[in-house]
Amino acid sequence: MDAIEKAIRNALEKGNAEDRAFREKVYRSAFAALDRALQANPGVTVEVAIKRRKAIQATITEIESEFLPAVPDVGLEVDAPAAEPAATAAPAIEIGGDQAPSPAVTVDGPAQPASDAPRSRVLPVVPDIMPDATLAGVPAIDMSAPAASGAATEVAPDRDERRIRGRRLPLTAIFFTVTLLAAIGIGVFFAIQTGVFKTAAQLDTAPPEAPPTVEGDDFTPADGANAPAKPGAADQSRNWINVFSPADPTHVAAPSDAKASVMKDDTGPFLRIQSGPSGSAIAFDVGQGVLEKLAGKHAVFDIIARAEEGKDTQISVDCNFGELGDCGRKRYAVGQQRNEYLFDVQFPNKHPGSAGTIAVNSDFDKQGKAVDIYEIRVSIEP
């Protein structure tokens, strides 16, 4: 006897089992207990829940058949002109509704005594009884309580579901193993690339060289030839071609709302330029002879400049080299210290045909700030 049948029979024994209404309430209580057990186990699938419900229906059908009276075997006389009905009522149990009258049964031949007549059991049809939330006067049935045999009545996944879970576990283990091996492989590759596995002979065990020392603001590198140039200082390693010098301001053109004037202080002579409110630029001529030297070459232009004292600014630079093209628009943040602002141009191998210009806007934000231009020069890259 399984746990479900045991629980239902125990409940029937606590009342009048011969009362059909009482049995129906017990059956409804069994379905309600099943629903509670299913809700307490959210891992159960719909298919498993349906199987458990049908199992209870089969158990109820079996139990209910024990309360049906036995009926004799019957036969039909086909050739008889008329058959006298000797009806023996076989009640049909219908849970949840009124009891319908049983159909008439015709017996062929004289009726046999009740003691000698063969008997057979008719299994009732048990409908799909819906559970009631509360049933007065019915013993409670707990599908999760342990049965007399000591086995707990619980809704467990069926065999197909366990088989699927069994197949899922190896796939998870395989994925984890592959991921772990990939991580180990990446770690080994990284260690090889970074030289972790170098032998002692391959490692540089020589004492580290002493870093160069800095005393005050002066730094003397090991090789004086490779020392970096100071800001504003001429790079003697280049063959510079002069484009503009404050000594000859005649090659500068300033629009009507712009200013350009030669000035001098302890840093040397310079040309202070100031763009107008319209943002107009000051143009510096680049002679045709200079452009002829640059044709087909890679050239680097150098503008040595600083901002007016107390007024850092941003300048923009445009070029027009005639047949040789332009340099695109350049933009630089200029501070109050003299510095160099470089840009390079790859010139096509053409004849320039005329002179060109380099236009400088002293204040990209159009706030009237000035810039001091010390020199504009160009060199040819080897």
Image: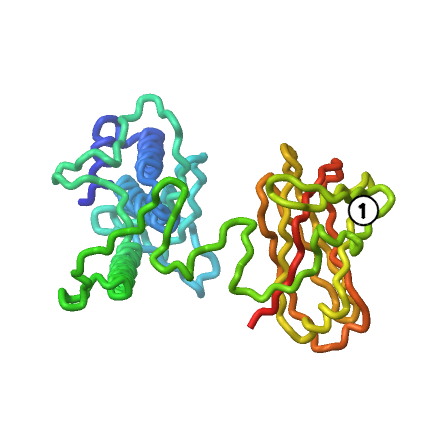
In x, y percent, where is residue 326? 73, 64
Q: Residue at x 82, y 52 (%)?
A: 253
- Which residue position holds label 1? 280
Residue drawn at point x = 65 percent, y = 59 percent: 377
Look at the image and tell me in which quarter the N terminus lies: top left
Percent position of residue 366, x then y: 75, 39
Quadrant location, the C terminus: bottom right
Residue 190 visible somewhere in the drawing: yes
> Callout 1, which amino acid?
Ser
Residue 348: quadrant of the picture: bottom right
Q: Quadrant of residue 368?
A: top right
Dividing the picture into quadrants, the one containing residue 137 is top left
Relative to 237, residue 218 above or below: above
Picture layout, residue 322 above or below residue 313: below
Colour setup of the view: rainbow
Nearer to the camera, 84 or 38: 38
Residue at figure coordinates x 61%, y 69% from the top left = 380
